[in-house]
Amino acid sequence: MIELDKIRNFSIVAHIDHGKSTLADRLIQSTNTVADRDMKAQLLDSMDIERERGITIKANTVRIDYKADDGNTYVLNLIDTPGHVDFAYEVSRSMRAVEGSLLVVDSTQGVEAQTLANVYQAIEADHEIVPVLNKIDLPATDCERVAEQIEDVIGIDASNALRVSAKSGIGIKETLEAIVHRLPAPKGDRDAALQAMLVDSWYDSYLGVVVLVRIMHGVLKKNDRIKMMSNGTVHQVERIGVFRPQMEKVDELGPGEIGFITASIKQVRDTRVGDTITHEKKGSTIALPGFKPSQPVVFCGLFPVDSAEFEDLRDAIEKLALNDASFSFEMETSAALGFGFRCGFLGLLHLEVIRDRIEREYNIELITTAPSVIYHIYMRSGEMIELHNPADMPDLSKVDHLEEPRIKATIMVPDDYLGDVLKLCQDRRGMQMDLTYAGSRAMAVYDLPLNEVVFDFYDRLKSVTKGYASFDYQMMGYREDSLVKMSILVNDEPVDALSTMVHRDRAEMRGRAMCEKLKDLIPRHMFKIPIQAAIGGKVIARETLAALRKDVTAKCYGGDASRKRKLLDKQKAGKKKMRQFGKVDIPQEAFISALKMDN
Amino acid sequence: MAEDWKQGGFGLYIHWPFCEAKCPYCDFNSHVSKNIDQKQWLKSYISELDRTAALTQGRVLNSIFFGGGTPSLMAPETVKAILDKVQTLWPQANDMEITLEANPSSVEAGRFKGFHQAGVNRVSMGIQALNDDDLRRLGRIHTVQDAMTAFDIARHEFDRVSFDLIYARQDQTLDQWQSELRQALSMAIDHLSLYQLTIEQGTAFGDRYNRGRLRGLPSDDTAADMYLATQDICAEFDMPAYEVSNHAKIGSESRHNLIYWRYGDYIGIGPGAHGRLTLDGQRHATESHLQPNVWLDAVRNGTGDSSVVPVDPVDQGAEYLLMGMRINQGISLSRYAAITGQHIGTSVLSELQDLGMIVVDQDNLKTTLQGRSILNAILDKLLLDQ
Ligand SMILES: Nc1nc2c(ncn2[C@@H]2O[C@H](COP(=O)(O)OP(=O)(O)O)[C@@H](O)[C@H]2O)c(=O)[nH]1
Ligand SMILES: C[S@@+](CC[C@H](N)C(=O)[O-])C[C@H]1O[C@@H](n2cnc3c(N)ncnc32)[C@H](O)[C@@H]1O
Ligand code: SF4
């Protein structure tokens, strides 16, 4: 049993490349949690895709034993958090599982922004925050300026900021001491009924589903029969342990502790982040606050480029879904694309991550169709239909009206960028609900249509604020609006995979933007290609892609005919990434890129 | 089609892999080296000639081509010894063409007489541009004045002289190119090669291009305009195009290159050289070791070839099309069918014909001018959409 006052739980908040992983490695190393030779550089962030995109998708955690200067040994639990708004909910749960955060800032760069979203989450979770100025070994380090900036931009005291070089190991000891002395110990009642928060879960091929938990009250032991409060399912705990970072068995987990359990849970889908776990008998009746079953909000079609790979795709999607409760799918057929799946995601990044994993881990090339939200269509007959795919839009004469999902978006931004943010929200049909200031930071709350947001709102927000804005949203329900289905015709043929729902007032602008985009995305052909946007039978925008005028290899390499044959093979491979619509080849990336708006 | 090659002829290509300096756009197999033992190279070429002659005994040789790199850096004695040897190995056509590629520097011009005496009867000079700024940007080490002097010597020495220009260069306008081309045509003898600058991966230009640092390249549309203007102006000077980038007075076409384009047989000797050889009725693709030293060692051990592979009928057909569609004459549909055992689909042909890209006249298939400007797309259709 570990005394509450000997436990410290924390997360590290940092912008990409500011040194979060390096610092975590150092903390682990300097406490001999892993033998040096076992140390794989950067133990936390492990998946390839995460590494490449500089994000962490699945929470990861490690327990460190630290003998402090006061002579006591403390248990430090570090939880790693995802860093994107699509996973804002997951982040908020991780944040609730710990009491403090290290805010790591590269002292040669300064506060760099996307982090702000996570810092705000940490503030929201009442964390004690310890600023860490990293990379002080570099000549360009400027701790004074960066500390001042932290105070200005984030509004927390940085006078006691730690000065660290994670790379050279400077200030590591001080960081550990600060974790012990500046972060609060967790609270909890050992004798109360069990309340454990499900922080994360994933599938492990040996152990089955592994569940990461934070014990709030009570004690969890091996063989306990536990109940998931959201759905009442009961399981028996088989293994219980902690991460160091490799798994290590323990006898029990008590209040304030973070660890894992396995309990013959078949699918990750059966576990819900934020859920409360208690005992089957004499359990708690009160669920922890804030639980939200995750629901896909963005839908799109995934089709194999090579239609022979449909079954492989099914297999891949099923496997991924087992591990990801927030991802849904059902079969779909498209006139132009054949068989595929309509899939639901938490947001666009989530979509891209899943798509990349299918392409990379399962080696299936995909065509992704225009993302959409769920519309409610009220028919004249009184029936209500959920529309997941604009291509399925029923005949207008039978439709009474349409409703679309709206969100409440909360955006925090340094006031220098406020004007741009308000304009962006306005352009996306937003209605302002609130605007307040805290220091030089503004908080704007907007009621926005989800379909204006799912696609590229976050990217645009980042770009107009140079990344200095945070963004969080909640679903607010449905509201009627004047929405129409816009079709795209390429060479006079409708391409169903490019159909989108748009607001009538914005249709023309969107149509023009899409036609212009497609004109750039579709390679020139031997003939000119009209690209049109239409509502019903009425063309609202039109572009013409000029015919190809020059594509010939200028020089002939001696007698190297095979070189040219290889070139042709390359062309052939390139062509596989295209899909034919009538006589026109459309590259797969066009389906998503055409929708990105530049304003 | 066991002896299909006979419809294209038989040639010998000899690759000299060295240059004075590497040009930033060039991805030919060329190396800069200070110590080249010409004797050793000669020995190796002779050994390869012996080896390949044994495979092709009795065939009549239509042409020889010294390509590079910069073969004008070869000692005239080396060239002579090679040509003397060739005389003893193959019967030769009466009008045999023997071309040598030359860079237009004074050093090399000094050797022209020696090359002529050795038996070379045609030179192809890499003049590349007619203004010094552009020559510098192309990384060339000669000036326009050097080129003119070398060209005069060449003209004096040889009846047949061709030169190369590279256009669609950085910051070149259509007008500038048109006047440069007229100037070139006014000095041209009987043949001109006019290549649009191609950015090749793995070259200095390629790297710069990838980093977004190669500025001022003409747009595809401008390049297309330049290409069309080139056709018009050359025709005006009686130097019509007979291939995508090659122009000649009627009858002065490069016979050697026509062997490639008519898909004949050719021996390739020297580092990185390619050949197509029909042996026992089967066409083979040969390729020599790329690295000069590796090639020398390999020759010492018996053969400079790194690979000799049979080309299957479908690939032969593709090669015939890839090469043959480059020339004005185009290809023979029945020859294609005889090589591959398949016909080109009539629907593709009529689609391309309707678009005005090709002309089908009984057995003959060729591109229109419009079609030739987008030959890759056409080949793509002909070969992929079957
Ligand atoms: N010079 C210096 N480089 C550092 C320091 N900490 C991290 N780095 C380097 O910064 C880069 C990003 O660090 P990493 O820990 O991967 O950042 P993360 O993306 O926040 O996890 C890596 O190349 C590290 O080696 C430091 O204290 N000094
Ligand atoms: C292999 S070079 C041999 C001639 C000789 N070494 C010279 O450069 O003068 C043959 C010709 O190809 C052309 N060439 C080489 N690289 C090229 C490129 N990247 N784009 C266009 N033409 C190129 C040049 O005109 C050159 O004269
Ligand atoms: S262009 Fe000619 S001179 Fe320049 S490197 Fe290539 S082969 Fe050598």
Image (cartoon, grey):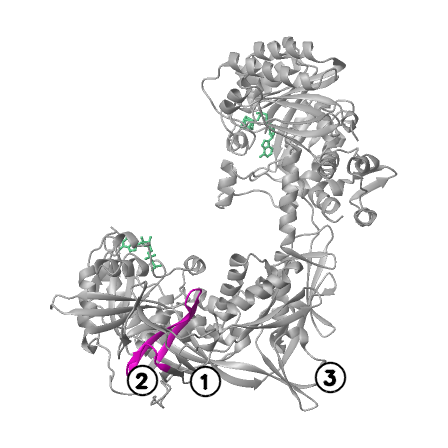
Q: Is residue A566 magenta?
A: no
Comes first in the chain, label 3 or label 1: 1
C-alpha distance separating marks 2 and 1: 17 Å
Residue B345 on image: x %, y %: 81, 46
Side (left or right) of B291 relative to A221: right
**What numbered label is drawn on residue A42?**
none
- Give the main secondary structure, helix, strand or loop, of the magenta stretch: strand
Side (left or right) of A542 relative to A162: right
Does mark 2's beta carbon lie closer than 8 Å to ligand 1? no
- The type of residue carrying mark 1 is Asn
Comes first in the chain, label 2 or label 1: 2
- The type of residue carrying mark 2 is Leu
C-alpha distance separating marks 2 and 3: 57 Å
**What SS does tag 2 mark?**
loop
Q: Is residue A224 magenta?
A: yes
Q: According to the image, label 3 marks what residue?
A: A397
Does mark 3's beta carbon lie closer than 8 Å to ligand 1? no
C-alpha distance separating marks 3 and 1: 42 Å
**What numbered label is drawn on residue A231?**
1
Do pointers 3 and 1 mark residues of a single chain?
A: yes
Q: Residue at x 69, y 43 (%)?
A: B376
Residue B20 visible in the picture: no
Residue A178 visible in the picture: yes
Q: According to the image, label 2 marks what residue?
A: A194
Q: Residue at x 51, y 67 (%)?
A: A320
Comes first in the chain, label 2 or label 3: 2
Q: Kindly indicate the quadrant of the structure image that contains residue A7.
A: bottom left
**What SS does tag 3 mark?**
helix
User: Nearest the camera: A271 or A153?
Assistant: A271
- The type of residue carrying mark 3 is Ser
- The residue segment tinted magenta is A197-225
